[in-house]
Image (cartoon, rainbow, N blue to C red):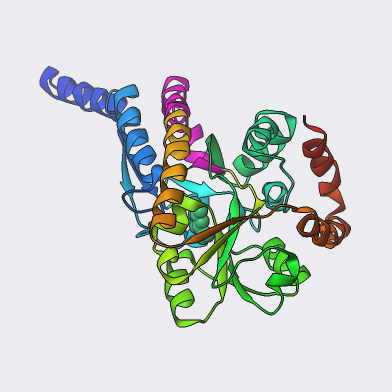
């Protein structure tokens, strides 16, 4: 005979299981260190998730890429070994074809244009494909524009000729450098400073906060405003983990990501301006490129080759280009 006491204990245990269904502790990947706008934004995101879910979901953010390189961390999030992270869409391209839209040089006219595309139909296509691949974007971060830096100014594509330039892992970036006559060198972010210092590469390309935050400005002399890539970033979560949450918890986590993204964009604007001032004060010569036309023209072949190999991307590219 089962006593009332045993029944009560069983009921209590069940209740505990039921209420702890969403007690989750997530690990978040972030490549940046203290002092970078995204590090502050990811800490804020963690705080906001905690608040919005009443502590049911907690997020431990691991900064400085300690959970692995970006391609590795992306794979970890895709399979659910890490739950969430702040990713750049560049390295997502090799995993999710639609994400490559943003890695076509000069596809966006400006950062606001990039956000308009993301918030429109083209963005929906990209977000859906990412979610299906296991890396679901909850909100978009600003990552400004990427420009070249080296030991000399780069004013025309011809200035890239013969230079070994570090790029992120994506065939579109190797094509981009090759078309200018340079030698592309895909490499993990964590290795770039040393590679620049020892001359393993002659240059690299990034936005001001990243150029400053990991000391690339200490080992180069010129930053040339080519602004050839405007690549957004995301707070991306493992799709299955997110889908397993109740509707309320999903809304809470998404809301926290959206709020963190608003904060990130503000921090980004301030942080980019400050980073530029700081590197200039440290001796970096920043040069405007009066006419970006020759750089854009050099990218024609990148588009032609890419669309010939990926004809199914044509509609998406045109959708982005047609966005006002
Ligand atoms: C930074 C991005 C980061 C990339 C890095 C890179 O925020 O996600 O890993 O560039 O160049 O701007 O690898």
Instruction: Report the residue at 71% width, 61% height from top.
Output: 172
Q: Judge whether 249 appears above or below 224 on screen.
A: above
- Looking at the image, can residue 181 be seen? yes
Q: In the image, is residue 153 above or below residue 277? A: below
Q: Does the rendering let one see residue 2?
A: no
Measuring 41% from the left and 45% from the top, which residue is drawn there?
274
Camera-side residue of 283 and 26: 283
- Left or right: 285 with respect to 62? right
- Where is 254 relative to 60, above or below? above
Identify whether 14 is placed above or below 25.
above
Magenta residue check for 242 = yes
The image shows residue 232 at horizontal and vertical percentages of: 58, 43
In the foreground, 195 or 26:
195
Q: Is residue 160 left or right of residue 273?
A: right
* Quadrant of the drawing holding the C terminus: top right
Q: Main secondary structure of the magenta part?
A: helix
Figure disc tally: 0
The furthest residue to the top: 4
| Residue 277 coordinates in the image, percent (x, y) | 42, 49
* 320 relative position to 59: left or right: right
Task: Point out the image quarter for the N terminus.
Answer: top left
Instruction: Report if residue 108 lies within the magenta region.
Output: no
Image: magenta residue range: 233-261
- Horizontal arrangement in the rendering, residue 23 relative to residue 220 (left or right): left
Q: Residue at x 70, y 74 (%)?
A: 182
Rendering coords of residue 275 (x, y %): 42, 49
Q: Residue at x 28, y 23 (%)?
A: 54
Residue 27 location in percent, x, y? 35, 47
Choose between 296 and 285: the one closer to the eye. Answer: 285
């Amino acid at each position: 005979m089962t006593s009332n006491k045993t029944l009560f204990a069983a009921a209590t245990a069940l209740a505990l299981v039921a209420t702890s269904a969403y007690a989750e502790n997530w690990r978040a990947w972030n490549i940046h260190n203290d002092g970078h706008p995204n590090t502050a934004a990811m800490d804020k995101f963690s705080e906001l998730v905690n608040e919005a879910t009443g502590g049911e979901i907690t997020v431990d953010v691991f900064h400085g890429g300690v959970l692995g390189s970006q391609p590795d961390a992306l794979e970890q999030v895709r399979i659910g070994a890490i739950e969430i992270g702040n990713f750049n869409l560049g390295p997502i391209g090799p995993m999710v074809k639609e994400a490559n839209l943003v890695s076509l040089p000069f596809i966006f006219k400006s950062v606001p244009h990039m956000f308009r595309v993301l918030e429109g139909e083209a963005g929906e296509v990209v977000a859906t494909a990412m979610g299906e691949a296991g890396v679901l974007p909850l909100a978009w971060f600003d990552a400004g524009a990427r420009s070249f830096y080296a030991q000399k100014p780069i004013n025309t594509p011809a200035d890239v000729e013969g230079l070994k330039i570090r790029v992120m892992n994506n065939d579109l970036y190797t094509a981009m450098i090759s078309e200018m006559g340079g030698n592309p060198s895909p490499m993990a972010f964590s290795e770039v400073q040393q590679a620049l210092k020892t001359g393993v590469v002659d240059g690299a390309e990034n936005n001001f906060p990243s150029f400053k935050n990991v000391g690339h400005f200490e080992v180069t002399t010129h930053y040339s405003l080519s602004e050839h890539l405007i690549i957004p970033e995301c707070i991306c979560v493992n799709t299955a983990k997110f889908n397993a949450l109740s509707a309320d918890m999903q809304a809470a986590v998404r809301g926290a990501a959206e709020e963190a993204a608003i904060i990130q964009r503000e921090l980004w604007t301030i942080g980019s301006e400050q980073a530029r001032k700081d590197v200039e004060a440290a001796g970096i010569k920043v040069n405007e490129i009066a006419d970006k036309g020759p750089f854009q023209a050099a990218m024609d072949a990148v588009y032609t080759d890419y669309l010939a190999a990926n004809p199914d991307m044509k509609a998406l590219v045109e959708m982005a280009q047609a966005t006002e």
